[in-house]
Amino acid sequence: MPVRPARPAATVRALALATHPAPAGAVTVVATLLAVGAGVSAVRVALVAAAVLAGQASIGWSNDWLDADRDRAVARADKPVVQGAVAPALLRTLALGSAAAAVVLSLLLGAVPGVLLLVLVASGWAYNAGLKRTAASVLPYVTGFGALPAGVVAAAPGRPGAPWWLVAAGAALGAAAHLANVAPDLEDDLATGVRGLPHRLGARVCAVVGAVLLGGASLVLVLGPAGPPTPAGWTALALAVPAVAVAALAGTARFRRRAFPAVMLLTVLDVVLLLAGGAAVT
């Protein structure tokens, strides 16, 4: 479909949608909150937020650029490229430019935090470039979201190491997000030759595994920090119950599109309650 002339405001809106704003925003918020909780200075918190947001934008734009033909083939009406609102060439330019910005912004934090934050960006690009079609499709999510909290914490004074439970929870949440994110598009993906791990497992198995990972991540975040669980921690576990239930039902048509928002919302709430409970993340 040719790109139709559009008003600047419409083009900006299309480009914003192509970043996949909900997950990009959730990841940026989580990184920013963790930076604050780790005692990172205000200037460096802003730098963390900018670096993560640039990286997430690059992943979203590269996804819509690289998947343009596939999305057209299955008539993905929610995609700006399919709507003719934006050209793949523009998405390619923006994806590469924002990736470069993410590199610069991340490394301004220092070599260790910078490289760790860029693991998430590289993982997202690797997934978009082809790993999504393989049995290792979950690997970029596990690696990238395990590295994210480690990179944020390393940006704190003294470059401390992130506690094991924070990295483990990040990796588990990443895997759960992958399974939930793919659930609504399993048939379209298979029709265009994408056969990642979720497609090989099947919708119902993915739903069960995703729910276990989501619940396990919440348990680790509550029980991992030193000392008994706080009231905020018990609240987090209570909130996890409905989110895990929705994830477990993602194998059914009714709940397929609800699982991924549930994972994102629970992740943000878990981090908010983790920090509210005074857990040390450094």
Image (cartoon, rainbow, N blue to C red):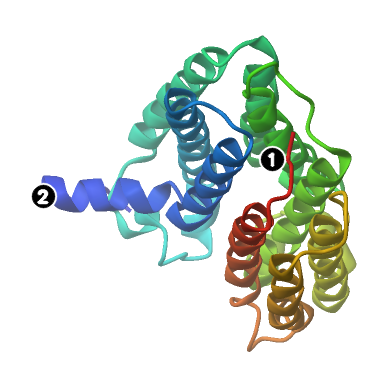
**Residue 58 rendering spot, x and y as whole percentages:** 48, 34
Q: Quadrant of residue 178?
A: bottom right
- Which of these two is toward me, 251 or 234? 234
Task: Return the residue at label 2.
Answer: 7
In the image, residue 173 sits, relative to residue 91, either above or below, namely below
Question: In screen coordinates, is 94 left or right of 228?
Answer: left
Residue identified by numbered label 1 = 127
- Seen in the picture, residue 101 relative to 18 is either above or below; the reply is above
Q: Secondary structure at mark 1?
A: helix
Residues at marks 2 and 1 touching, judged by CB atoms closer than 8 Å = no
* Residue 122 placement: quadrant: top right
| Residue 86 rendering spot, x and y as whole percentages | 30, 46
**Residue 199 visible in the picture:** no
Q: Residue at x 62, y 72 (%)?
A: 262
Dot 2 or dot 1, earlier in sequence? 2
Tell me the CA gap for discs 2 and 1. Answer: 33 Å
Amino acid beneath label 1: Tyr
Q: Amino acid at mark 2?
A: Arg
